[in-house]
Image (cartoon, helix red, strand yellow):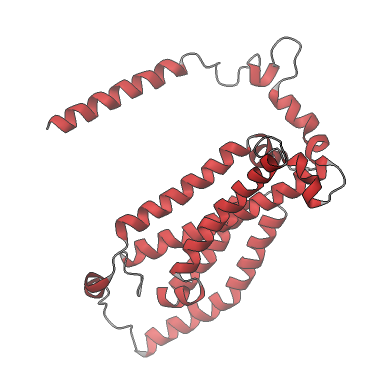
Amino acid sequence: MLTKVFATIAVVITGGLLLYGVSDFPAFGDPHSPANAGVGNEESISQYFITQTYKDTKVPNIVTAVLADYRGYDTMFETVVIFAAGIAIFAILRVTGNEAEKKSIKPPLDSSINGDHQRIIVGTTCRIVIPVVQMFALYVVAHGHHSPGGGFQGGVILGASFILVAMSEDLNAALRRFSEKTYLTLACVGILIYAGFGLMCQFLERNFLDYGILQKVLFTDGPEMARSHSMLGVEVGVAFTVTAIMFAIYANLSSRGVLKNGL
């Protein structure tokens, strides 16, 4: 009971502080706010992004430039949050040993004519659709800095393709293609790729995620193209992590942490 009281007090205090801070924000859609009108004679943030993004980065997609470059710190930690969510679900649900054997008991699949007929239709359709879905996912990642898309969107689509394998056959079939060791490794590699670009900038005596200096490593024509290529690199890292965590969450939730049979 005492714990609930302290928890309630903490929530009320935190909520009050947040509401107090919100009162200092400009009104929604206020044209005179710093984000829309700037301060004094300075150009506003939104105006700067619209007019200067392509000059700074050679990236026509303003959204991707903002996410992966101008506010790259925030996007990197968003990826870390996704990674942490997947690891938390893994830590809570994953079971092994005797307990896993007890939970993995499941009625056999329907071997009747109707059951086989349904599996043939679904399985054949998915075998046709899944490669197309995966190709589109890679396109969304690769062209995310030139057209709508990026690592988050492409990663979700790619992760969904492995979930589709699990739903059309069973979880074991999906795990043969994308094993637990593989998706956990891929999730970590994605974070390391993103952070690695930032560390390379520091090794070359520039700020973390200040991609322009990487022209020395990427052999690009100017710092602007270095920023463009680096954004593609970090988007690939994001896609790795999102793909792996998407499938990891499904695999553990659908099998109650046993990683057998699934839904």
Q: State the residue lying farthest toward the left.
A: 1
Q: Can residue 263 be seen in this snapshot?
A: no
Q: Position of residue 154 (x, y in %)?
A: 61, 56
Looking at the image, which residue is at 81% across and 45% down? 225
Q: Position of residue 35 (x, y in %)?
A: 65, 21
Q: State the residue lying farthest toward the right.
A: 221
Picture layout, residue 33 above or below residue 45: above
Q: Can residue 54 be seen in this snapshot?
A: yes
Looking at the rendering, which quadrant does residue 60 occupy?
top right
Q: Position of residue 146 (x, y in %)?
A: 76, 48
Q: State the residue lying farthest toward the top.
A: 40
Residue 1 is left or right of residue 130, and the answer is left
Q: Position of residue 169 (x, y in %)?
A: 44, 77
* Along the viewing direction, whichever of 74 and 166 lies nearer the viewer: 74
Task: Report the number of discs.
Answer: 0
Quadrant holding the C terminus: bottom left
* Along the viewing direction, whichever of 25 and 100 lies nearer the viewer: 100
Looking at the rendering, which quadrant does residue 75 occupy?
top right
Looking at the image, which residue is at 50% across and 79% down? 123
Picture layout, residue 224 above or below residue 22: below
Quadrant holding the N terminus: top left
Looking at the image, which residue is at 71% across and 36% down? 206
Picture layout, residue 115 above or below residue 167: below
